[in-house]
Image (cartoon, grey):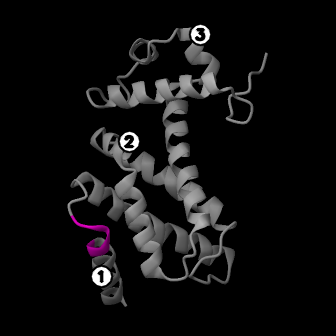
Amino acid sequence: MNRDKTNKNVTRMQKQTRTWIKDALMQLLKNYSFEDITIKQIVLTAEISRPTFYRNYDSKKAVLDDTLNDLTEDYYSKFRQSNITNLHDLLMFCFNYFENNHEYLSIMIAAHLTSYITDKFTIEFAEKLNDTQTWREWKTPLQKQIGVHFAFYGFFNIIIFWIATGCKESPETMTDQTIEVLHNLT
């Protein structure tokens, strides 16, 4: 029997159970490496049964993926509602968003999952770029891929650095300093 493990046809209780599972994984990542965490630890921490876990997820990686998908979906939902027309506004939006939504990312960064996070966000960003108007006009599909990987991978590493250091600088300072660095690159 194939079960629907997407968020399309889930009840409120299933959503709550998934939240408990994701929260349990994040709690465990504070003390254990991702590789060392077991499904047993997740179900004990979430206070659910093993069959309940497997009704929702195939693996702990699927839990991590779902956690990052929640973040990217929320980001793009808010991004689509904004009216960003230039680099300054885009950077401000990003820094403000991640300042307000950095709890799980902080845990994942401390758990040495930065490459995984960056890869996942870059892939998501590249896919969603087709659906949004960008302030940058890339003329070919190759330019778009180069632009996405160069700009986003580099910028997301700045976000990771900022979160890892406790978001000490304001979004305004980070935006201004990032733009200054970019101007000095050309």
- Crowding at dot 3, Cα within 10 Å, few <14 / some 14-19 / many 20+, comes out as few
Q: Which comes sooner in the sequence, label 3 or label 1?
A: 3
Residue located beneath label 3 in the image: 51
Q: CA distance from mark 3 to mark 1?
A: 51 Å
The quadrant in which residue 181 appears is bottom left
Q: Amino acid at mark 1?
A: Val
Magenta span: predominant SS is helix
Secondary structure beneath dot 3 equals helix
Q: Which comes sooner in the sequence, label 1 or label 2?
A: 2
Q: Amino acid at mark 2?
A: Tyr
Given residues 142 and 21, the one toward you in this image is: 21
Residue located beneath label 2 in the image: 104
- Crowding at dot 1, Cα within 10 Å, few <14 / some 14-19 / many 20+, comes out as few
Secondary structure beneath dot 2 equals helix
Q: Is residue 127 magenta?
A: no
Secondary structure beneath dot 1 equals helix
